[in-house]
Amino acid sequence: MLLSIRFAFYSKHLPLLDFLLFVDETSRLLSKL
């Protein structure tokens, strides 16, 4: 339920979601170094 609410919110803010995913992936890669 919470996931669907979050998806509905992010579907209106896709550029922000893409940016957050990019930051998350980048921090994940940097933590492996």
Image (cartoon, rainbow, N blue to C red):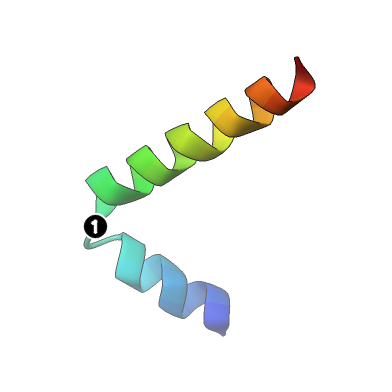
Q: Position of residue 12 (x, y in %)?
A: 22, 62
* Quadrant in which residue 6 is drawn: bottom left
* Secondary structure category for the residue under label 1: loop
List the residue tagged with mark 1.
13
Q: Residue at x 24, y 44 (%)?
A: 15
Q: Please say if 1 is above or below 4.
A: below
28 vs 3: above or below: above
Is 27 left or right of 19, judged from the image as shown? right
Residue at the spot x=42%, y=45% of the render? 20
Residue depicted at 47% across the width and 36% down the height: 23
Amino acid type shown at disc 1: His
Name the residue: 55% across, 73% down. Answer: 3
Along the viewing direction, whichever of 1 and 13 lies nearer the viewer: 13
Where's the C terminus, which quadrant?
top right
The quarter of the displayed image where residue 11 is located: bottom left
- Horizontal arrangement in the rendering, residue 5 relative to residue 31 (left or right): left
| 1 left or right of 9 in image | right
Task: Tell me residue 2's x, y (percent).
Answer: 55, 82
Above or below — where is 7 with respect to 32?
below
Against 32, is 4 above or below?
A: below
Rendered location of residue 4, percent (x, y) = 48, 75
Q: How packed is label 1: few (under 14 Cα within 10 Å), some, or many (20 or more)?
A: few
Question: Exactly how many numbered labels are in the figure?
Answer: 1
